[in-house]
Image (cartoon, rainbow, N blue to C red):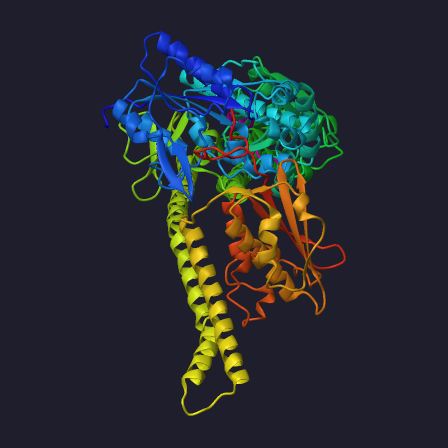
Amino acid sequence: MNDVPRGRLKVYLGAAPGVGKTYRMLDEAQRRASRGADVVVGYVECHGRPRTEAMTAGLASVARLRCGYRGGEFEEMDVAAVLARRPAVAVVDEFAHTNIPGGGRHPKRWQDVEDLLAAGVDVITAVNIQHLESLKDVVEKITGVPQHETVPDDVVRKAEQIEFVDIPPEGLRRRMAHGNIYAPEKVDAALANYFRPGNLTALRQLALLWVADRVDEALQSYRAEHAIGGVWETRERVVVALTGGPEGDTLVRRAARIADRSGGDLLAVHVARSDGLAAGVSHASLARQRRLVEDLGGSYHSVVGDDVATALVDFAHAENATQLVLGTSRRGRLERFLTGPGTGETVTELSGDIDVHRVTHERAGRGTLLPSRRRTLSTRRLIAGPVAGLVLPVLLTVALAQVRGTVNLTSEALLFLLAVVGVACIGGVTSAVIASVTASLLLNYWFIPPIGQFTLDDPNALLALGVFAVVAATVAAVVDRSLRLSRRAARATAEAETMSSLAGSIVRGGQTIPALLERTRETFGMDSAELVDELPDGADATAVPAGPGNYLVLRGRTPSSSERRVLAAFAAHVGSAVERGRLAQAAAEVEPVRAADRMRTALLRAVGHDLRTPLAAGWAAVTSLRSREVEFSPEDRDELLATAEESMVRLSRLVDNLLDLSRLEAGVLTLNLRATALEEVLPTALADTPTAEVHGEPEDMPPLLADPPLLERVIANLVGNAARYSPPGARVLVTASALAGRAELRIIDRGPGLPAGGRDRLFEPFQRLGDTDNTTGLGLGLALARGLTEAMDGTLTPEDTPGGGLTMVVSLPLAGRTQPIRTAQHVGGAT
């Protein structure tokens, strides 16, 4: 099987049900079949649409697998039959569908599709944007409908082709109104709820943005594979350079305005030097600016580079940026004159096709807030030092010659000594020696009598020359030592800054392994980064251990020794993330066992008391009746029999509840759904609760689609629970209404209501309000009521009763046409 090439996946993505994904998917299948490909329909849901069903004509199909679940019969894709058929192309609809237990190889259909792809079968499928895992919460906030069927984004992202099927919201609503999507009885409810114009517009925007991001990823991958360094202005991408100075907030806001006007992306980048501190860097400012960037919808990046301008331009080219935003230099005019062009000028020269914006700010030209980072002997300083050693003493000689007679010899010697010290600070030992020799000769010739001639044979002259040389060497040695310490501190700070940025990203975002790898590639300016389980053979690859059996492999340039230390830390983080993923998976596998164990423990704890009470009462009554030592009157005998009967009824009810809850947990509860009138179940359900009162005329209600005995159990449990917590003499009200194809039953009490935070635990088995009453049952009533309601395709939700109390709302579908085979329905399942 390993020698079989993996099949290719094509996904038709839509913003909402009904946009035409299934039709387009079948049209693609027809085209491939017409070209001679062996195409098989594995599973397609046409939802009764004639035009869609017509598209299946002529296509071979595999019989569906039928399985029973909770009293109904369902159809699922027969994966084994498709694999046995071994077609070239399989058409599989509803990619995010959850399989009925026992109806598939895996819990999810996309996992079944993975089996087909692994067997070399090409798959064409369809999915809606609301079923993507990353957008689940967003869609629920927009539509108010929770999404229970999802598919991981990575599974869809890895598809060879993703085709977006689009239709304007107005057109989709017209299709809905014409009955081309849902059955007529569902149209009004759908148009008023899920298919509102605002919902459809928001879903359409989500889908377009998601597809645009995937297209951008494909473009970046293509550019990297073909080594394309030029800028393709397919989408505006604005990069703002942050130094950690106070002007960063201004730059971020200006860049955000540019990105907003062009509808582009905002990226902020900070270059951390490995050999020096950036001027004016404030890590607190960087953290604040990072939060500002993320609040404005941008992304923050940190890269390592010895040359800030080059690293900045390389990052912009790698991200296909179209615009660069920089702040004007904080250096003053004199500093710019002495040190030459700065980062801004160099970036402008190297930018090429990228537009560069130089933004002024309040700190422009006012100097740096922290000492300059130029604490290493750069090429400019190596040249400037000896030149200063020759020129500065000459200039000082000319200046002192103009004021001869006003400054004594001691002051002149000290001024020359000060010049030597200055040159030593600029150029190091070599420049200091040149300056000391030049200064001592000029001082000897122009200022020490006899003026105009050298007196090098004089011991005083030789002493002066020696003092100049010793002072220069001492100062140069101190400068060199401080530079070495500064370089070490700068490297440590840069490494700490980079690691802090990575750690912060992990803590804030819980990044996935691909995101961490991309972050590593980006930070070190590499062509690619991947996690492998064996060392690579290529000489162009840099491999670092990332935990047991894993290696972080980067391809591109060769990192320096200082970068390798940071890279090792990155690899450790990646290895930790892999280990956390393994532990999370193991914990997820153990959780069902823990849940079952908690249920079993709670059951045993509850049975120890709650079943013992009626059993003890019944046992005592029966034992007394069988006793021959006591002669009971007819009244006493009747009372003992009533006690025994009541205990047995109570015990039977508890056992029934336990059995039904067990069947629900196991998914084997038998259902007999049929048209059920309320007047058929209400009298029996309310018989044991004399305080219950029905408001309205239940006989006027249309019939519900329900299982009558189960519905009776639901109502009886809810009414009994309401009566238990109602004040003495208070009535429990039962009302019924119908709306949008569903019936709502409301059981209203005037009890204490729910305490703060009690709603989350309300439907847990073996729980009671406050857990204060341990004598009235196992606490199964509400848990069982919700389980039975959901088994009948209904919902049970609590609401606060106006004026105090609790209202339980049971929502069930109204009776309509029935189908011999039930198919799993879910919101947005139509295509």
Give residue 604's quadrant in the image: bottom left
Q: x, y (%) of residue 568?
A: 39, 40
Residue extending furthest front? Answer: 634
Q: x, y (%) of residue 782?
A: 55, 57
Q: Residue at x 28, y 33 (%)?
A: 535
Of residues 306 and 7, which is closer to you in this image? 7
Q: x, y (%) of residue 416?
A: 63, 34
Relative to 269, residue 628 above or below: below
Of residues 49 and 625, which is closer to you in this image? 625
Give residue 289's quadrant in the image: top right
Residue 490 showing in the rendered view: no
Left or right: 306 in relation to 408: left
Residue 97 showing in the rendered view: yes
Left or right: 801 in relation to 465: right
Magenta-span inclusion, residue 24: no
Of residues 126 and 353, which is closer to you in this image? 126
Q: Identify the magenta region.
A: 372-386
Q: Residue at x 37, y 11 (%)?
A: 32
Q: Residue at x 35, y 41 (%)?
A: 102
